[in-house]
Image (cartoon, rainbow, N blue to C red):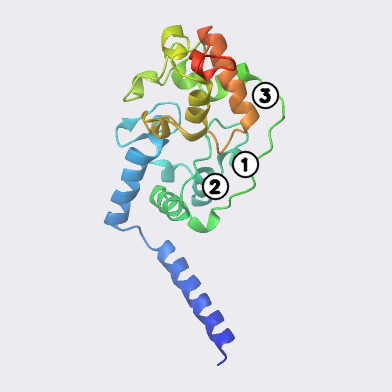
Amino acid sequence: MSRLLLRASLMLCASALLTELDAQPITPFSAQKAERLLRDKYSCLGCHAHKGEGGQLAPSLHDVRSRRDAAYIAAMVSDPQHTKPGASMPRTRMPATELTLIVRYLGGDPAKIVLNPAPTPAAVADGRQLYAQWCAGCHGLTGKGDGPNAKALPVAPARHSDAKAMSARSDDALFDTIEAGGAIMNKHHRMPAFGGSLNTVQIRALVAYIRTLCQCQGPAWSRDGGEP
């Protein structure tokens, strides 16, 4: 057998083995790892409840397999906007191994994970509309931190209407928090990262709208023409 044929045969065997492993029930160790990822690393429990913990904005995760088929679960975890257009669930950027593990844990089929190209939003973004869709569930429509999900969070959401607090945050800090999530700014990881679903124009529109809620600007050093 030639090296080329041998390599192709080995790759087919490996692929078949991975498919077989994906089809097997998840082990207790893997289940515990998936639960830790959901609880301690990603923002999923900011909106979803799981085993008595988590938010109230979205359907619970502990029994999702009884309500949805495996293909839908895999598609929704990997690409929510294409699976359910208009959904207020951001695409969570994560390593393929962790994505596959979480999908398997929830009862999805890893073979159904398909990451479509991210949608191209309109160049002009409406900050008020974006805020109502993506932020108000926790922060409240007027930025008072009183959204319907606020009481379910382990840490109170930021009050975007608080001029004193928001004046201490630069526009860049607000942008980075929205784009990459709370953990990147040493805030709570239940604040999701929206960079997988919103483009730069949209995130800047959100920052500008937050400034209208607090009726304030960031620190002088962070503004054009401000003091160093």
User: Vertical placement of 77 versus 156: above or below?
Assistant: below
| Image coordinates for residue 9, horizontal then vertical, percent | 53, 82
At label 3, which amino acid type do we have? Ala
Q: Residue furthest bottom?
A: 1
Q: Helix, strand or loop at disc 3?
A: loop
| Image coordinates for residue 101, horizontal then vertical, percent | 40, 53
Q: How many residues crowd mark 2 within 10 Å: few (<14), some (14–19), many (20+)?
A: many
At label 2, which amino acid type do we have? Ala
On residue 226, which mark appears?
none
Residue that mark 1 sits on: 82
Residue in the picture at 58% in, 36% down: 197
Query: Residue 24's quadrant in the figure?
Result: bottom left
Which numbered disc, 3 or 2, marks the residue that appears first in the sequence? Answer: 2
Near-viewer residue (25 or 170): 170
Residue that mark 2 sits on: 75
Residue that mark 3 sits on: 125
State yes or no: discs 1 and 2 in contact (Cβ < 8 Å).
Answer: yes
Q: How many residues crowd mark 1 within 10 Å: few (<14), some (14–19), many (20+)?
A: some
**CA separation, marks 1 and 2?**
8 Å
User: Vertical placement of 3 versus 11: above or below?
Assistant: below
